């Protein structure tokens, strides 16, 4: 709740001055976005998560699993904003990608399919 959100803002403010290519800065954005989402502030979380996704795609395009995790958080935000069609389309895509990368029996694939 409140502590996670405070830590998210602290992480973002602490690492904001680092270059875009700094992994810790990218993780700070992710922590903030996840904290906002977990605090039922999906409207604020969505652009933060989208910024983190853009950074990940731009600087670490081969980090497919990390990108999928951020996209899953975006799907949760979309559901929280009652944008169910977009969330469902994204979740279906996520399941297909997890299955292709990890196989249908992997825990992450199964969890992705159950969301």
Image (cartoon, rainbow, N blue to C red):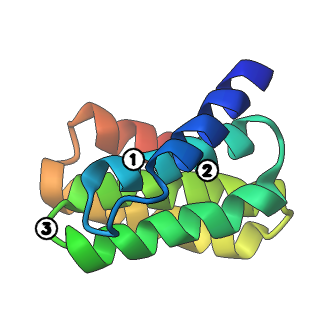
Quadrant the N terminus occupies? top right
Q: Earlier in the sequence, mark 2 or mark 1?
A: 1
Dividing the picture into quarters, in which one does residue 47 lie?
A: bottom right
Q: Residue at x 19, y 60 (%)?
A: 63
Q: Residue at x 32, y 47 (%)?
A: 24
Dividing the picture into quarters, in which one does residue 38 lie?
A: top right
Which class describes the residues within 10 Å of circle 1: few (<14), some (14-19), or many (20+)? some
Task: Give the side of residue 6 with respect to residue 80, left or right.
Answer: left
Which label sits on residue 27? 1
Circle 1 — which element?
Answer: helix
Camera-near label (2 vs 3) is: 2
Task: Give the side of residue 102 with respect to residue 69, left or right.
Answer: left
Cα distance in 3D space between marks 1 and 3: 16 Å
**Going by the picture, which residue comes out furthest to the front?**
17
Q: Is residue 56 above or below residue 115?
A: below
Cα distance in 3D space between marks 2 and 1: 10 Å
**Residue, disc 3:** 62
Q: Residue at x 55, y 70 (%)?
A: 50
| Residue 1 shows in the view | no
Q: Is residue 110 above or below residue 72?
A: above
Instruction: Give the x, y percent position of residue 112.
Output: 43, 46
Does the residue at mark 2 contact the one at mark 3 (Cβ under 8 Å)? Answer: no
Instruction: Give the x, y percent position of residue 57.
Output: 30, 75
Task: Give the side of residue 36 with respect to residue 48, left or right.
Answer: right
Q: Earlier in the sequence, mark 2 or mark 3?
A: 2
Instruction: Give the x, y percent position of residue 7.
Output: 61, 29
Dividing the picture into quarters, in which one does residue 62 lie?
A: bottom left
**Residue, disc 2:** 33
Q: Residue at x 86, y 63 (%)?
A: 82
Q: Is residue 115 above or below residue 23?
A: above
């Amino acid at each position: 709740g409140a502590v996670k959100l405070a830590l998210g803002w602290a992480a973002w403010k602490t690492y904001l001055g680092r270059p875009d290519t700094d992994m810790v800065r990218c993780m700070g954005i992710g922590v903030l976005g996840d904290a906002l989402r977990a605090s039922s502030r999906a409207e604020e979380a969505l652009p933060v998560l989208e910024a983190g996704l853009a950074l990940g795609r731009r600087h670490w395009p081969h980090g497919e699993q990390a990108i999928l995790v951020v996209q899953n958080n975006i799907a949760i935000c979309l559901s929280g904003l009652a944008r169910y069609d977009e969330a469902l389309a994204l979740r279906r895509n996520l399941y297909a990608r997890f299955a292709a990368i990890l196989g249908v029996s992997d825990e992450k694939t199964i969890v992705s399919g159950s969301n």
